Image (cartoon, rainbow, N blue to C red):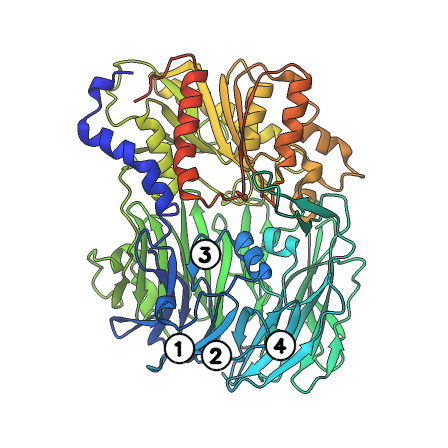
Amino acid sequence: MHSSTLTSEQSTNSADFPSQFARSRRFSLGVPRHFTVSPDGRRVLFVRTGSGTDPVGRLWQYEDGTERLLADPALLVGAGSGAIPEEERLRRERARERSVGVVSYATDDAARLVAFALSGALWAVRTDGGTPFSVPAAGPVVDPRPSPDGRYIAYVSRHCFHVVDLTGADRQLARAEGPEISYGLAEYAAAESMHRSRGYWWAPDSRHVLVARVDTSPVERRYLSDPADPTKPPQAIRYPAAGTANAEVTLELLSLEGERVEVEWDRKAYEYVVAAGWDAHGPLVTVQSRDQRIVRTLAVDPATGATEVLHERTDPAWVEIITGTPARTASGALVLPEDGGDTRYLTVGGQRVTPEGLQLCAVLGVEGERVLFTASDDPLETHVWCHEPGHGLRRLSREPGRYTGAARGGTVVLAGLTPRGNEVGVLRGAGAAGAAGAAGAAGAAGAAGAAGDPPYQALTSLAEEPSITPRPVHLTLGERKLRGVLYLPSWHEEGTGKLPVLLDPYGGPGMQVVGRARGWFTCVSQWFAEQGFAVLAVDGRGTPNRGPAWDKTIHGDQLGPALEDQVDALRAAAARCGDLDLTRVAIRGWSFGGFLSAAAVLYHPEIFHAAVAGAPPTDMRMYDTHWKERYLGHPEEQPGNYERTSLIGHGHLLSRPLLLVHGLADDNVAAAHTLRFSAELLAAGKPHSVLPLPGATHLPADDAVNAQLLHFQRDFLISALEGGAGKK
């Protein structure tokens, strides 16, 4: 593979990258995140670890151009000495949390009191210069949240719901009636598939709380064991597989005086609680039918628990959940998404406020009548936008990238994944008139802004700079205008020789790998390119930011369109780049990408010559209710969708080298997916390889394992392509 053309510097960088990728937790350490802006816009709270390789999160405050450390676990006596509660471990797994220490926090309405948990202990700190202090709690603390007035902190302990004042006077407002009951926690389907990680919401009066009660007793029980340590007992989990019973979720209105009122709605018809909240107009709840074709927004009477339907959304396929909706403005106008053909609009008070072609992604917040949201008018970028009556619609992030943010009091925090990596900027005076020329996070990082731009300042990122520099070539491919990106070796000269091809997709709902941004996945693709591959990543049908019609093309079939798009993109890319060798084509991926990779060598061995499938969901019946029934329907009503989409039952088709990789502690895509598929392949006499990862979840956490996984995949693919891609 022309190893002599690889420079010494490039060779060193390429060799170091897997270790750097692992120790930096995919370059996530040291990046500011979890932003809260004070009501006056002067202060910004955030979490950041100590360096690009330090996994311990610390709480910070930015004010008047200065960053100040509020809480460092290493400086708190007794902090981190206890075990993390199981409920908190599961919450972090659902959030794919990669750090320790202060990983999350919550504040009162004034952002003056901050509460956080460390190894089950409750801690608080005031942002006016005080030091962190411990707050006595009744047991291990999960998800502590101060009341709006800052007088109390609510938390969950051993599935029971508590409220404590800052002196340690504790009230148990709801006691779990049995081991399968919990108060104040999100159930599995909500946290994994609905973007709802919370299970309780304070009222503005700080005297009442809306609390979810979850009964998991109807849910199918699964057992996770550690084969590498047979002395450990198996762990029992409740997992709602497609077609089986969900957890029973109810809502209760609790007062600090001990009164309890149950929220009433037709739970048989609408068993999913998608979102909830409590604003100045009262409690607001969103519920969804089991087939996900109807979503209702309900106003709740806090005195009686009775509900009134404020809005209903329907769709013949499924109603897409948009994070941050529904919300209400100060005047009570509902903030909701609306699907119309090729566009997902933002509506306020029933009126569309975004134009055709601008795809709503998420609502970030509402202040007064102003709505902050993310949207995309180009599949390669996602930007922060603002809408306010009288001032119209404005884009606040300017530089290319994928942005999110937070805003209050005329200050906006813009967090962007840009072509230079993660960048975070605080934009002052980004209120009504001043936001028109707002700079992006790149401006906050030091780029010159336009005349008249509001003042901005960067928040310091301590993330490591990747040793690999991605060299993306963006492509629009085929009749469906598929967005793709091609990575070639830095040492390769066009026309000097054919390169084996490696497809590197995700390809499923909820994630894009193609964009004008440098993420960990772009660096990994470039690393594989430096090993001698032409790497092609493509976002096909069903991936985000192309509109509702694009989303719904996979309804009833999550495999056919996704795989067809990868094939079409490969052929179109080869027609444009003559150095791609279509006689040596491999594909790799994780989760849905792993499923897609395994399917590629099953169904198209004439195109794909080897595959690595990480954590692949091979039997769609074993995946969770809310996610899988959204796309394939109920397995009893649409069994053909599951048979057609699952790999189980089709193993006899394998004729190419396949490596299956799976964490044995994965509670999202159970290792049974890989083990059953492997057994089927063996019974059919189909050679393949299996790499089990003891103790690893859906996102393996061991740094050594993550580093070696890249080497292992590379070596397998090079060998599988029969020496056509010599190791660099």
User: Which of labels 2 and 4 is toward the front?
Assistant: 4
Q: Residue 115: give x, y in percent of width and height.
A: 47, 74
The residue beneath circle 4 is 162
| Spatial CA span between label 2 and label 4 | 20 Å
User: Which of labels 3 and 1 is toward the front?
Assistant: 1
User: Which is more toward the observer, 212 or 606?
Assistant: 212
The residue beneath circle 2 is 109
Q: Secondary structure at mark 1?
A: loop
User: Tags 2 and 4 in contact by the CB under 8 Å rule?
Assistant: no
3 or 4: tag closer to the N-terminus: 4
Q: Report the amino acid beneath label 3.
A: Thr
Q: In the rendering, which numbered label is found on residue 132? A: 1
User: Which is more toward the observer, 382 or 244?
Assistant: 244
Binning the other alpha carbons within 10 Å of mark 4 as few (below 14), some (14 to 19) or many (20 upward) gives: many
Q: Is residue 690 visible?
A: yes
Q: Residue 643: give x, y in percent of width and height.
A: 72, 29
Q: Which residue: 38% across, 45% down? A: 26
Residue 14 as seen in the image, left or right of residue 340: left
